[in-house]
Image (cartoon, helix red, strand yellow):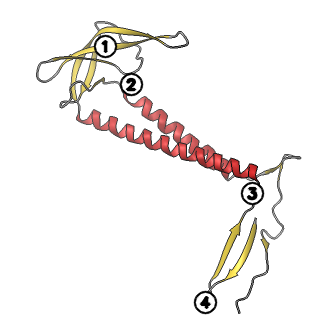
Amino acid sequence: MRRRLFYGTGNFVRISTTTTLSPDSRFFVYLGLGFVLVGIILTVIGVLWWQNVRHFVQTAERTEGTVIKMIESRSRRGNTTYSPVVEFTDQQGLRREFRARGSISGYSVGGKVPVLYDRERPDSAAIDDWFDLHFAPLVFCVIGVGFIFVMVGSLFKRPKNREKGEEEPAPENGTEEEPAAMPE
């Protein structure tokens, strides 16, 4: 890293720091910045999703539903999962049913479950289960923040001498300075 001193107008001195990076180093800096950007995007998606879920939970109508069937689905790997289909009665007395998001274990046909549904759109319903509602937004936030911390940490990590595995020594006086140019 080089520091160049420039004299500006008046009594102010402006210091310009320039760093010369090899093409390989530049690639990894850009890659790290890309990961930070992805981390920020994932975190924002997770926070917005969590706020949406929180708003839904606070404004939704609560009722009790019954698991009427379990829908079996197979993954490409051959794993079998089951999603409950829940039936409930809304405020107008109409029977509604919905398929729970994802694969939720612990439910059986005929079992009673707490249900949340949107009064204006009763087809928008979910089982009132903290894990079912909040897990996916939480995963987005954790992965996003993890990307940010790991990549920001790696960008500020001091490079090591590749041959000896030691840190490169700092210049003796802390910086390499070129003589200051005096304005005429």
**Which labelled disc corresponds to residue 21?**
3
The residue lying at 43 percent from left, 34 percent from top is 137
Q: Amino acid under label 2?
A: Asp
Cα–Cα span, label 4 and label 1: 76 Å
The residue lying at 74 percent from left, 53 percent from top is 158
Q: Amino acid under label 3?
A: Leu
Q: Amino acid under label 1?
A: Val
The residue lying at 82 percent from left, 55 percent from top is 168
Which residue lies under the disc numbered 2? 132
Cα–Cα span, label 4 and label 2: 64 Å
- Specify which label sits upstream in the sequence, 3 or 4: 4
Image coordinates for residue 73, horizontal then vertical, percent:
43, 11
Cα–Cα span, label 3 and label 2: 47 Å
Label 4: element kind: loop
Closer to viewer: mark 3 or mark 1: 3
Label 4 neighbour load within 10 Å: few <14, some 14-19, many 20+: few
- Specify which label sits upstream in the sequence, 3 or 2: 3
From the viewer's perspective, tell me whether residue 157 is left or right of residue 35. right
Cα–Cα span, label 3 and label 1: 58 Å
**Which labelled disc corresponds to residue 10?**
4
- Specify which label sits upstream in the sequence, 4 or 2: 4
**Which labelled disc corresponds to residue 45?**
none
- Specify which label sits upstream in the sequence, 3 or 1: 3
Closer to viewer: mark 1 or mark 2: 1
**Which labelled disc corresponds to residue 85?**
1
Cα–Cα span, label 3 and label 4: 33 Å
Residue most toward the right? 163
Label 3 neighbour load within 10 Å: few <14, some 14-19, many 20+: few
Image coordinates for residue 29, horizontal then vertical, percent:
67, 50
Label 2: element kind: helix
Res 117 quadrant in image: top left
Label 3: element kind: loop
